[in-house]
Amino acid sequence: MNSKSLVGRLAVAALLLSSSFSGAQAQVRRSTYSTAPARPVYSAPVRTSPATPGVQFGLRAGVNVSDWSGDAVQSVMDLAGYANGAVTKEMKPGFHAGVYATIPLGPGFAIEPGVSYSEKGARLVGTLPWEQFDFLNARVTATSRMSYIDVPVLFKGYLTPGFYLFAGPQASFLVSNKVRVEAGALGFNAFSTDFDVKNQFRSVDFGAVGGLGYQFDNGLGLSAGYDFGLSSLDKNNRFDAQNRVIKASVNYSF
């Protein structure tokens, strides 16, 4: 084989290799710079903790169901002159309304001072001492109608967003206290009179408050609590009785 033939064959082989390499590079370029849409990649949303809100003010109102513990019979009046000794207690309904401020202490905690008007007291019911008239269902009722200005300082702890527990001390200032005595039969009142007994009761009642609630994002809230009076109500220490109040409230924070 002469040298010219060998050189020609080597040139043809080199040309074929160069063509194959150029085709492979073109294929790589088409794959790299393809205009086909890329498959989207999704990532989990990043959750950020909400910033601690500032001071909020609000309105609160609701219903009370109150009673007295201890010697409640003597604390209203001596029913012996009206009843035969068979005296029972009943819960007294009332209402409360006031304002408050919620002050954050950090994530999940707040302090909430407030001022509200609150109706408390107790109701005693006795049977009139005339056995011959038992069929008339004759009875006497004595109702202590107490009005207070409550000043609680509550500590709130949030268990979940919106749901919280609260507890704290409360000072209650007596505004008025009148006892209404009613006597009647067959569901009709035949006798009714009021006694002002405010000067016989302590002007300040100290107690503890506790309960739970839920605050919605729109500012509305619901709560239920219990007022546990610690002070004896009679300022002359003739009897031992304390306030007990169950509260259900609706509030709005803004």
Image (tube, rainbow, N blue to C red):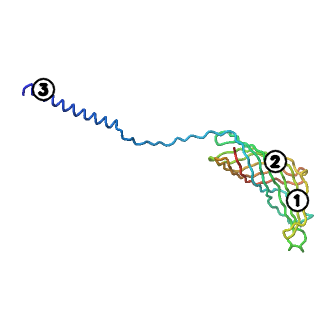
Label disc, if present, on residue 149 of the rendered structure: 2
The kind of residue tagged 3 is: Val
The kind of residue tagged 2 is: Ile
Q: Position of residue 29 (x, y in %)?
A: 31, 34
The kind of residue tagged 1 is: Arg
Label 3 vs label 2, nearer the camera: 3
Secondary element type, mark 1: strand
Q: How many marks?
A: 3
Secondary element type, mark 2: strand
Label disc, if present, on residue 180 of the rendered structure: 1
Quarter in which the N terminus is drawn: top left
Q: Residue at x 91, y 60 (%)?
A: 193
Spatial CA span between label 3 and label 2: 115 Å
Residue 187 vs residue 100: left or right?
right
Q: Residue at x 28, y 36 (%)?
A: 27
Q: Earlier in the sequence, mark 2 or mark 1?
A: 2
Residue 161 vs residue 123: left or right?
left
Q: Position of residue 251 (x, y in %)?
A: 71, 49
Label disc, if present, on residue 7 of the rendered structure: 3
Q: Nearer the viewer, residue 113 or 53?
A: 53
Q: Earlier in the sequence, mark 3 or mark 1?
A: 3
Q: Earlier in the sequence, mark 3 or mark 2?
A: 3
Q: Position of residue 228 (x, y in %)?
A: 77, 51
- The local crowd at label 1, few if under 14, some if 14 to 19, many if 20 or more residues have their Cα within 10 Å, is some
Secondary element type, mark 3: helix
Task: Name the residue at the left extreme.
Answer: 1
